[in-house]
């Protein structure tokens, strides 16, 4: 397999859902059993993920990198999804939940700065993968899952694979696990609107907590430090997480409005994060936040630059859309291009929107593009039909494997009134 081919494809047009791992690319050796061959392929794909995606995205903590190399993510997904286990994408694990993407897992783990003698509490066991990544990095991992079937299945998988220092419990994680408190570190992998008080109380003084906080489709990963009994926070990365279940979801103050889908920070006027990243957007690749009074809207825009065909440059944003209430959406954006050349038919510059149904099954991806060549600032616009089964979507802009430079500003999504 040519080094970057499948990874590049995983970042192309159909990035999050429709990438295909090039299975069977190792030459067939008659003395290897099929299972061994698969194991080798999976291992190779795992190292490629670490070297081509995680490390270049800033995951540099040596122990965390090693844990990502050693943890068999394919064991935490259904057999049918194994081939996608080492693409940087979330995958369904049942009950409308997903296993976190490897990049998110490694970034959250690195943010926790795990030490061998520490005890960590995780909220949102899901598949058990995040807990498995933490297992060799700390002394004990306590993890709580609210969905009974998921918690039990994760506990079985962790036991089968010998992660003996991981303890799983089914229950509401926002109440913490008082019998084992205080914890040196707490990692929350579902997304509360605010930090639940019991978790703040159960964090040891001097301890760290990583939490994605915010509105359902626009979240930021926060790192909190507990000092003299109080949590001090600092913003990290914008991210896109699965919705919560139960009470916490119902209690959100700012709800997404699926009848009027909108983009957050579509003109990039909110200051970029110090560590890199645009508020409201996710999954930043080869993007620069540009200060420019001549921007089509306000004083800023974003610029994607790529010189290696097939390597992705993009930004994503999740949104809610109810196909029963919205039958068409008009998507528009201001675009400026400089020598943009597609790498292949599906690796081209543009705006893309992928829609999902209530089981988070992909319904299809729509494109505004391909955009190519050189052009001054101008408006690109297209109307997309929304199937009635649509419930959420991912909006994407970027070069998606094309080379050249593309600037975007004033991105908008509007329901077409009939
Ligand atoms: N860490 C997981 C993925 C997290 S997905 C992994 O590595 O696979 C988020 C998980 O949080 C889901 O399984 C969801 O059921 C769970 N969850 C949501 N709200 C919760 C709560 N209040 N307490 C415990 N778990 C919760």
Image: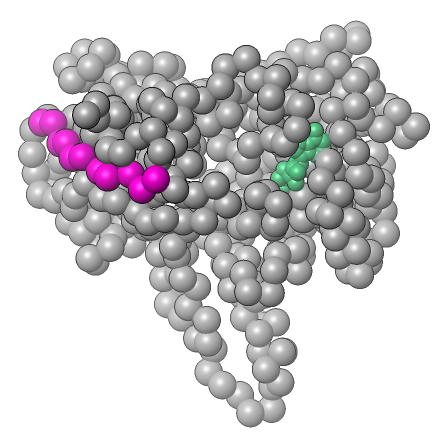
Note whether 274 is above or below 404 in the view shown.
above
Where does residue 252 sit, x and y in percent of width and height? Answer: 57, 17
Magenta stretch, overall SS: strand
The quadrant of the rendered image in which ligand 1 is seen is: top right
What residue is shown at x 60% (from left), y 30% (from top)?
244
Where does residue 280 sit, x and y in percent of width and height? Answer: 41, 23
Q: Is residue 267 left or right of residue 133?
A: left
What residue is shown at x 74% (from left), y 24% (from top)?
174
Where does residue 90 sit, x and y in percent of width and height? Answer: 52, 46
Foreground pick, 44 / 408: 408
The reply to whether residue 302 is in sight is yes
Note whether 238 is above or below 142 in the view shown.
above
Q: Is residue 318 left or right of residue 313?
A: right
Q: Is residue 114 left or right of residue 242?
A: right
Figure disc tally: 0
Foreground pick, 211 / 330: 330
Foreground pick, 22 / 52: 22
The reply to whether residue 236 is in sight is no
| Colour scheme | one colour
Residue 382 is covered by the magenta coloring: yes
Query: Which region of the structure is painted magenta?
Result: 378-388
In the current view of this chain or complex, which residue is farthest to the right?
Answer: 179
What residue is shown at x 23% (from left), y 12% (from top)?
299
Note whether 201 is above or below 189 in the view shown.
above
In the current view of this chain or complex, which residue is farthest to the bottom?
Answer: 30
Where does residue 68 sit, x and y in percent of width and height? Answer: 62, 50
What residue is shown at x 61% (from left), y 49% (from top)?
94
Residue 292 is covered by the magenta coloring: no
Q: Specify the quadrant that holds the C terminus.
A: top left
Q: Specify the quadrant that holds the N terminus.
A: bottom left
């Amino acid at each position: 397999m040519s080094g970057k081919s499948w990874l590049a494809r995983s970042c192309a047009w159909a990035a999050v859902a429709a990438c295909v791992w090039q299975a069977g690319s190792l030459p067939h050796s008659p003395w290897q059993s099929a299972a061994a061959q698969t194991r080798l392929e999976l291992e190779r794909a795992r190292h490629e993920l670490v070297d081509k995606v995680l490390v270049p995205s800033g995951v540099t903590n040596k122990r965390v990198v090693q844990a990502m190399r050693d943890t068999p993510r394919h064991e935490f997904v259904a057999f049918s999804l194994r081939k996608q286990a080492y693409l940087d994408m979330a995958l369904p694990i049942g009950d409308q939940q997903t296993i976190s993407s490897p990049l998110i897992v490694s970034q959250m783990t690195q943010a926790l700065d795990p030490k061998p003698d520490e005890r960590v509490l995780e909220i949102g066991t899901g598949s058990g993968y995040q807990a498995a990544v933490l297992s060799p990095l700390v002394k004990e991992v306590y993890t709580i899952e609210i969905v009974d079937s998921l918690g039990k299945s994760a506990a079985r998988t962790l036991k089968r694979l010998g992660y003996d220092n991981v303890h799983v419990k089914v229950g509401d994680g926002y109440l913490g696990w008082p019998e084992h408190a205080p914890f040196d570190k707490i990692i929350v992998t579902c997304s509360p609107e605010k930090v639940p008080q019991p978790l703040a109380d159960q964090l040891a003084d001097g301890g760290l907590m990583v939490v994605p906080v915010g509105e359902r489709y626009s979240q930021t990963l926060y790192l909190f430090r507990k000092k003299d009994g109080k949590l001090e926070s600092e913003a990290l990365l914008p991210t896109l997480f699965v919705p919560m279940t139960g009470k916490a979801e119902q209690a959100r103050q700012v709800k997404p409005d699926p009848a009027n889908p909108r983009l957050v920070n579509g003109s990039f006027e909110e200051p970029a994060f110090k560590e890199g990243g645009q508020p409201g957007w996710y999954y930043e690749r080869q993007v620069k936040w540009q200060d420019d009074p001549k921007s089509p809207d306000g004083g800023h825009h974003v610029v994607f630059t790529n010189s290696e065909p097939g390597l992705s440059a993009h930004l994503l944003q999740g949104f809610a859309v109810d196909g029963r209430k919205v039958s068409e959406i008009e998507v528009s954006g201001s675009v400026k291009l400089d020598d943009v050349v597609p790498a292949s038919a599906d690796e081209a510059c543009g705006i893309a929107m992928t829609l999902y149904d209530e089981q988070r099954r992909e319904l299809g991806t729509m494109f505004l593009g391909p955009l190519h060549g050189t052009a001054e600032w101008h408006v690109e616009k297209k109307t997309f039909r929304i199937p009635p089964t649509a419930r959420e979507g991912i909006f994407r802009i970027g070069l998606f494997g094309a080379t050249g430079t593309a600037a975007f500003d004033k991105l908008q999504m509007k329901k077409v009134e009939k």
